[in-house]
Amino acid sequence: MSWAAHDLEPYAIQRHFGRRVAIVPLLLGSYAPDMFSKWFVYGIEVFNIELKADDPVQFHRGWPGVGFTHSLAFGLLVAALILFVGRSRIWAFSFLLGHWAHVFTDVGDTIGTMLLFPFSTETIGIGAWAYAGQVGRELDAGAYFSGLGFVWDGVWVVYGLLSWRILKREYFRETIVAADPRFWGWLGRWLPEVALLALYRASFFYGTTRWVAWLIWAHVVHEFPFDLSWGGPGWIPAAHD
Amino acid sequence: MRELALYLAAAAAYITLGVAFPDLLWSWVEGTAFLLLAVWILPSVVRRLR
């Protein structure tokens, strides 16, 4: 799993494709695989009852489980639904790109994703950083921001900052709104442009600031040791397929 | 420049609050609400009060 890449990759894709993609479905696609499942991986407490998957890894990435949300076919299926129900080619294409970016990014951890589901339930991963969702979210944060995962996220932070022009008002007007005038026109009926701009920039803001905040939290407030070895950090019991 | 300063101030505040209270860092909705508050709602309120 990744912590900031899913927020930031859509902006890089947007920069590359320009008006051929729409940012809202790109972001929705990028968030979709974890949107309804992540809370159950870490667990939450409701009225003193803990709701958590018995086997968080199996639930999140496996089958049986909701691992199918991290397959290429799932992105295709939802994109096809958007195309046939919503009748929007740009929304379907953008959702697919965002979703596949998420799926391929998660290939980086020690579990990987069921890329070829339903033809195969085998997870494919390169094991660059530890998957540690099963140990709880704070320890997972400490581990992620001590291994190669945060470096991968850092690539997108730096790339995003170097692409600062895509965050400008002119780019928003000429590319973002022009690519998806129906959505932004509809939202613009209720909100002024300053709010629309903030919404457009929100995921970039969220991804970048929380990347910085988690790094400080992990290494200044706490003292989780850095370990940039492949599959690290070695001090966390990483889940493996 | 004023707009950039607002965003930078919002980022600094969010990072500071996030480090102190990591629970704030988990929700995209809360992060977005914070940004809207910092760069749109609060500046609008201040302008009206002047």
Image (tube, rainbow, N blue to C red):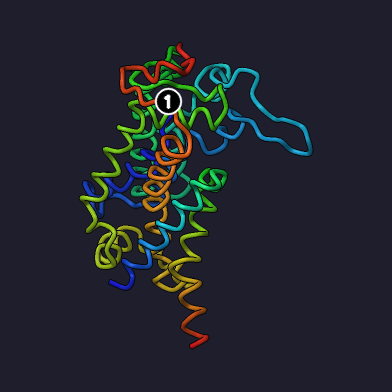
Can you say whether A122 is above or below B32 in the image?
above
Residue A66 placement: quadrant: top right
| Residue with the mark numbered 1 | A71
Using the image as rendered, state which of residue A216 and residue A176 is in the foreground.
A216
Using the image as rendered, state which of residue A167 and residue A116 is in the foreground.
A167
Can you say whether A43 is above or below A131 in the image?
below
Mark 1 surroundings within 10 Å by alpha-carbon count, few (fewer than 14), some (14 through 19), many (20 or more): many
Question: Residue A10, how many percent across, how many down?
Answer: 33, 45
Kind of residue at disc 1: Ser
Question: What residue appears at the point 50 percent right and 66 percent down from the top-left corner?
Answer: B37
Q: How many marks?
A: 1
Using the image as rendered, state which of residue A55 and residue A150 is in the foreground.
A150
Question: What residue appears at the point 43 percent right and 45 percent down from the top-left corner?
Answer: A213
Question: What residue appears at the point 37 percent right and 19 percent down from the top-left corner?
Answer: A232
Residue A174 placement: quadrant: bottom left
Question: Residue A62, how many percent across, how many down?
Answer: 52, 18
Q: Among all residues in the image, which is located at the extreme bottom? A: B50
User: The disc numbered 1 marks a residue on which chain?
Assistant: A
Residue A112 placement: quadrant: top left
Question: Residue B42, how many percent across, how many down?
Answer: 50, 72
Q: Secondary structure at mark 1?
A: loop
Horizontal relation, residue A238 to residue A197: left or right: right
Quadrant containing the C terminus of chain A in the rendered view: top left
Question: Residue A68, how many percent across, how many down?
Answer: 49, 24
Question: What residue appears at the point 46 percent right and 52 percent down from the top-left corner?
Answer: B16
Quadrant containing the N terminus of chain A in the rendered view: top left
